[in-house]
Image: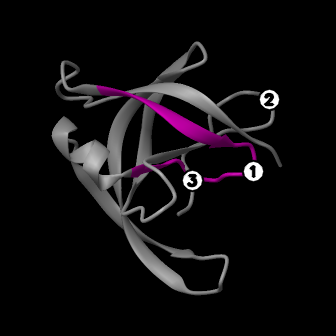
Amino acid sequence: MASFTVKLKVWNPVDPSRFAEIEAWADTGAAYSWISKARLEPLGVQKVRRLQFRTIEGHTVERDLAAVFLSAEGYTGGDNVVVAGFRSFGSAQFGVFGTGRRSRAQKN
């Protein structure tokens, strides 16, 4: 499992003029991409469901998923990302497969 940074463009699928360009940590072992609520709210993206996640400490947390479009490293597509409330972590973490292709998102 490796981590590195990647530049992302994230936008609202209903209103593509509402977008953000961010630098995110990419994690090749990640199952989900997590983007902070502060980054997603100005885009006006809609929450689509709520999921439970187990933290590294063994706690269970519940987080919303939001529908977005993402573009990174020549790949573009729709995704559901976890709406995160980061404390000291940063504003985004991008889930990727080791092949360089995006996965669906990452855990807080």
Question: Does dot 1 land on a helix, a strand or a loop?
Answer: loop
Please tell me whether residue 1 is drawn above or below residue 87 in the rendered image. above
Distance (Cα) linking label 3 and label 2? 16 Å
Where residue 99 is drawn, which disc sits there? 2
Please tell me whether residue 74 is drawn above or below residue 72 in the rendered image. above
Which amino acid type corresponds to the residue marked 2 in the rendered image? Thr
Q: Is residue 83 on the magenta stretch?
A: no
Crowd tier of the residue under label 2, counting other residues whose Cα lies within 10 Å: few below 14, some 14–19, many 20 or above: few
Could you tell me if residue 6 is visible in this image? yes
Quadrant in the rendering for residue 103: top right
Residue 27 place in picture, x, y as percent: 69, 45
Q: Which residue is mark 1?
A: 29
Of marks 1 and 2, which one's residue comes earlier in the chain? Answer: 1
Residue 97 place in picture, x, y as percent: 73, 38
Side of 42 relative to 26 (left or right):
left
Residue 50 place in picture, x, y as percent: 35, 67
Please tell me whether residue 51 is drawn above or below residue 102 in the rendered image. below
Q: Which residues are magenta?
A: 20-35
Give me the residue at 20% from left, 36% from top: 43
Q: Is residue 30 on the magenta stretch?
A: yes
Q: Which residue is mark 3?
A: 106
